[in-house]
Structures are given as C-alpha cells and as structure tokens.
Amino acid sequence: MHKQTTAGLVLLASILFSVLPVHAQEHHAWTLRDCIDYAMQHNIQIQTQEITRATSEASLEQAKAARYPTLSFSGSFGANFQNVATYNDYMEKSSGITASNNFGLNSGMTLYQGGKLRNTVKQQTLQTEAAGYDVEQQRIDLEISIAQAYIQLLYDKESLDLKQQTADLSARQVSRGEELFNAGSISKVELSQLKSQHATDLYQIVTAENTLENDRLKLKQLLELGLDESFEPAFPEISDELVATPLPELADIYAEALATLPSMKSAALGVDASELAVKVAKGSYAPSISLNAGISTGWNSSTGTTYFDQLGNKLGESVGLNLSLPIFNGKQTKTSVKRAELQYAAQQLQYESSKKQLLSTLESLRNDAVSAQHRYFSSQEQLKAAEESYGLVNEQFEAGIKNTVELLTEKNNYVSALSQLLQAKYQAVLAAKVLGRYMEQPIDL
C-alpha cells in the first residue's frame, strides 16, 4: 500500500512539473530575444524563402543529373485482326488473329554541348547558394523589424509613464490652486486654467495608452501570434551605458557589411551566375555530340516459333554516335546570347546600386545614432535647467509672485525636456543596435 501511494505521488508530481513550464511559458513576459527567436521559427516569409531555396536545390540536382546517361525501357503488346485471300485455281479465304510483343532498352548520353551542361551546373550552384543567403537576409530583416517594433513599445511605455506623472503633477497643482483660490490669492480664471491643463494631461494619458496598445498589437502581428495567444512584453530598463554605446567608424561598418551581409553576397553571386548564363547561351553555337545505345527483341505469333526462342533469335543491339551542328535557327541562339549579355550588364549595375544603397543606409543610421547620443546628453543638461526653473517658478507661484500662465509655461517646458530626452534615448539605442546587426552582432537588450 505504501509503495502504491509513493508511486502515485511520484506520478502526480511528474504531471505537475510537466504542466508548470507550459503554463509559465504561456504567461511569461516576452523579452526582445524571445520575440526574435520565436519569429525565426514561425515567420511565414522565412518559411516561404526556405521553400524557394529548396526549389533551387532541386533544380541543381536536376542540372547535375543532365550530365549522366539516360536509361529507358519500352514494351508493347499488339493484336492484329486480318482476313487473308489466296488466289490459285479458286479463291480461298482465311481469317485469324496475330499477336506480337516488342521490348526495348535504350540509353543516351550527351558527350559535348559547348560546355552548356557544365556551365548550367555552375550557374545553378551559384543560384542555390544565393537562395541560401536570401534566407539569411530575410532573417536579419525580420530581426531588425522586430527590434524596431519592440523598442518603439519600450518608448511608448515610458512615454505613458511620463504622461501619468505629468497628470499627477497637474492634479497637485489643481489641489494647491483651490487652496490659493479659497485664500483669495488667485482668481477663478487662474484656477480654471489649472483645471484645464489637468484635463488635457488626462487626455494625453488616454492617447498614450491607445498608442501603447496599438504598437503592442503590431508587434504581436509581426510575430504572427494567434488570436487566442497572449502577448505581454517585458519592459527592461535602458541604462545610460547602453545609450552611449561606442559607435564604429563608418568605413569599418561599411567594409564589414559589404563582406558579410547576406544580401550583398547574394547580389555578388547573381553577377557571377549571370556571367555563366552568357556562356550557357553561347554554348548553343557549338556542335552537339551524343552517344546512343539500345537493345531490342520481339515475338510474333504468326511465325510458329516458341515465345522464348523468338526473343533470343530476334535480339538486336545498336550503338550510335550523333553529331548535331547548328547552322541557322532563326537567330534564336544569337538573340538568347544578347539577352543574357544584357541581363549580365543589368546584374552588374544592380550590384553597384546595392552597394551604394547600403552605404547610404549605413550613413543615415550612423548619423542618426551620433545625433541621438548628442541630443540625449545635451537633453540631460536641458532637463536639469528646466527642472530647476520650474521648481523656482512653482515656489514663486505659491508665494503669489508668479501667475498661472507663467507656472504652466514652465511646467510645459519641463515636460517637453523630459519628452525630448526620452525620444533621444530610444532613437540612440535603436540606431546603435541596427548598426551592430550590420556588423554581425545579434540584437539584444
């Protein structure tokens, strides 16, 4: 009895422990890394790109197989219904059914085709490799998109906190204003101005909450989570050290991205593949030499010989070497070569354009990062001054020296300084993280 109870407890414990991680996973707060890892496994665009790569791999296998001999078997059965008339001293007629079997085994192999087979394999190999890089680039683009959406969410959350703090501050001002109004220190108009500002601040909270929720839904949709799947992001603290991440020189970033970015590798392979396409097209100018071999046999019921004897007696073997020399085909080869050469030139231009676009993107990102870092630290100084000025005006307002308009002006200046600091903070972090991804540094907070 004791052993059965112990076994039951062990079983119950194992069930509970197997359920708990799932429950925790359903309700845990999603970090940026959680979002990225999940998207890499479930994103439909990545899965579609994987299918494209698999299709390219299948095409490569087909191109390789074209160099090997072909082998085919054929068999047929026939029945011939006939009436036979024989003319001698008198006419005789006979009728009957004649049956037959024929079998054949044939093989063929292209020996030379102007290098078309070899160059086609090389071309398809490059295209398959490029398809692999396209998958990697899709992953990088998705990682950057998720980072942008996630950091925007962090900004929304801190912006909401700022709006709530601002509303709390204006509520205290209204409470103090009522005391001053009852004491005859301020007019009813000034008290109304304080209440109006508080109502505006409350409205700003509602707006910020809607923005936060909309951006949360955008990130959830980007992760392609289902309707019944919950999504609550984590909100980590962003330190000054993270904002002030040292930025590499533009030349170093560009050189690293040019050498390692999958999209640039894919574009370079596209140029090489287009060059091979020209060689493939020119191969049609050359003679084609192929080798053919076959073996055949058959049986016919009208011969009077046994089935297997006929199969042995009618056994035939053949070997042939075929030469095909193109002379004129309506300019098809010439046109194909011209199109391939134009495509090669276009691919070269596209590659150069991709390099210029990459440089432009990196220049903008780095300038944004540098500017945001400078604005962040200058905003800290501006915030100190605005906070000090607001504190002094608030004291003067309570002493009856400053009026409501002056108080609200200083308060808005203080809130504006906080908002500018917040914007610069997250712009600096995002730009630095994206730049780091171009240098093969995974995005994380």
Image: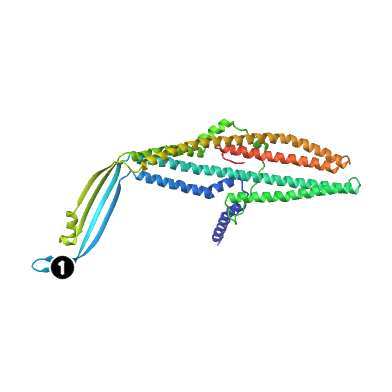
Q: Which residue is mark 1?
A: 94
Query: Which residue appears farthest toward the front when viewing the image?
Result: 330
Residue at (79%, 45%) from the top-left corner?
169
Position of residue 56 in the picture relative to residue 395 (left or right): left
Which quarter of the image is occupied by the C terminus? top right
Q: Is residue 439 visible?
A: no
Query: Which of the two residues, 225 or 233, is positioned nearer the viewer here?
Result: 225
Asked which quadrant contains residue 77, the reply is: bottom left
Height in image: 197 above or below 298?
above
The answer to whether residue 195 is seen in the rendering is yes
Helix, strand or loop under label 1: strand
Q: Position of residue 427 (x, y in %)?
A: 65, 39
Asked whether, in this view, residue 406 is left or right of residue 379, the answer is right
Q: Is residue 1 above or below residue 243?
A: below
Disc 1 marks which amino acid?
Ser
Displayed quadrant of residue 328: top left
Category of crowding for the residue at label 1, using alpha-carbon neighbours closer than 10 angstroms: few (below 14), some (14–19), many (at least 20): few
